Amino acid sequence: MTGPGAAGRPEGSALPERAAGPEGAAGPEIRRWHAELAWLGRGGVRSGVLIEASGGVFRAVTPDVPPEAVPPGTERRPGLTLPGLANAHSHAFHRALRGITEAGQGTFWTWRERMYQVAGRLAPDSYLDLARAVYAEMALAGVTCVGEFHYLHHGPGGVPYSDPNEMGRALIQAAAEAGLRITLLDACYLTGGLAPDGTPTPLSPVQQRFSDGDAARWADRLAALGPDDHGMLAPHARAGVAIHSVRAVPPDQMHPVVEWSHRLGAPLHAHLSEQPAENQACLAAYGATPARVLDGAGALGPRSTMVHATHLTRHDIELLGGSRTCVCLCPTTEAFLADGIGPAGALAAAGSPLSVGSDSHAVIDLLDEARRVELDERLASGQRGRFGAAALAGAATAAGHTCLGWPEAGEIVPGALADLVTVGLDSPRLAGAAASTALESVIFAGTAADVTDVVTEGRDVVRDGQHLLVPDVPLALSQSLRPLLA
Ligand SMILES: [Zn+2]
């Protein structure tokens, strides 16, 4: 969900060590799971899969191992085990709007006003509490990595905190405490929007909290966040960059963001053409669509991800696909906000990898996001079967991780980060699923509530539906949300 006028270890934060298990003189602990069924990407769904990991990385993956042949200490995993899910587009604080913005009618723009009210109340400590709870909800839904599109940088009136990255560090800490990896997509956000005639509009009082003034100062703040030469902020946290949108960043201010992406090898994300009004204002301002403006700024390419990409011209689709720019679809948010249905099939055919995100967190359910990519395509085209279950699962796993700068995650193969998500097949929704179509059952009928176990880099985060690091996730959510909505 977007905002304007319509994208080294931090000091002072207590980050747990990367999940690798205890290491003794004999080396890293070896963990083993025996999955009743596991989706092995191009290998399809296999049964009796013995999965071995150490040091947070898969070491061996062996299908067709009978139960009596597994080594002692191996954990059984009934159900279908998937790689970790990547939520490629999140604004953690939008979780506060769930449900309350469904009363009455409203538009994207009235929803945004309510979102600004919540933004105006957040401070670093309250944002830490809220984000920890929201990320814990994500973990329960099988998410092992989140792309946090972060633009709430400063205090009231736009006054920087003593550490100008205090809000970003709170998000990094929240992810650690909820057991997720995070890519902090630090967004440049400078103008209040574009009027219908293309005139830039000034920042509203709440929007002042989003702005660094100009892109050079945005870059200075990012440098102070302290990424190493590879863009790492902590073992579980990677720096990414974002151009909020063409509404919030004039083209002549985009270059520093693109430059930082090149310097760090960091993902670059941007909101793109979520609403027709954005396209109209952009055409009036710059004589080009948002996709062409971003292309002209050098912001497209294989390391870039455009979020939404709902209202595109044929030429826009060719620009995105031809440059292998990833597109992150957020189908639940796009439906809740009446954004429209994007051209997912055409984008994929043109060459764009697709990922998914829960964005405004109207719901947090990556299985729902994934299936809606195909269901929306069916509604728009009148045809079934553009995206099969494996393609949709790939969007929620490998493609999502790659577009967040973690290409080493999202597959159950030796050498990949040891993330596992197990979906039970014994719930009322999934009972009776056939082994041969278990992936289809899970993608097209499963929900977040069917996730039983989550392992992130070899460490248990969710076991039997219980979060092991945040003991009472509903309580954590209600306690952090109540003050924001009073
Ligand atoms: Zn968004």
Image (cartoon, rainbow, N blue to C red):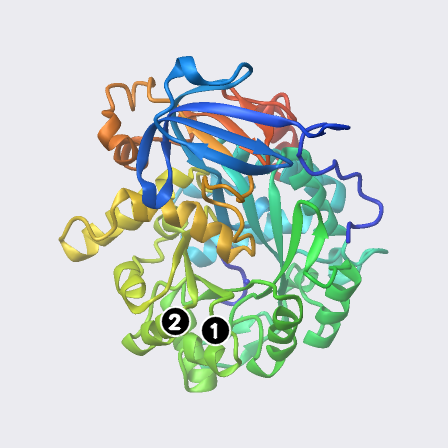
How would you rate the neighbour count of disc 1 (Cα within 10 Å): few for under 14, some for 14-19, many for 20 or more? many
Left or right: residue 317 versus residue 138 is left
Q: Is residue 319 above or below residue 400?
A: below
Q: Which residue is found at the position 64% from the left and 75% from the top?
A: 259
Judged left or right of residue 260, residue 98 is left
Q: Secondary structure at mark 1?
A: loop
Residue displayed at 25% across by 24% down: 433
Q: Which residue is mark 2?
A: 320
Disc 1: which residue: 300
Report whether 318 appears left or right of 484. left
Residue 187 image offset from top left, x and y in percent: 62, 63
Query: Identity of the amino acid at label 1?
Result: Leu
245 over 329 or under it: above or below: below
| Three-letter code for the amino acid on which mark 2 is drawn | Leu
Residue 280 location, quadrant = bottom left
Position in image of residue 441 (x %, y %): 27, 31
Q: Residue at x 31, y 39 (%)?
A: 44
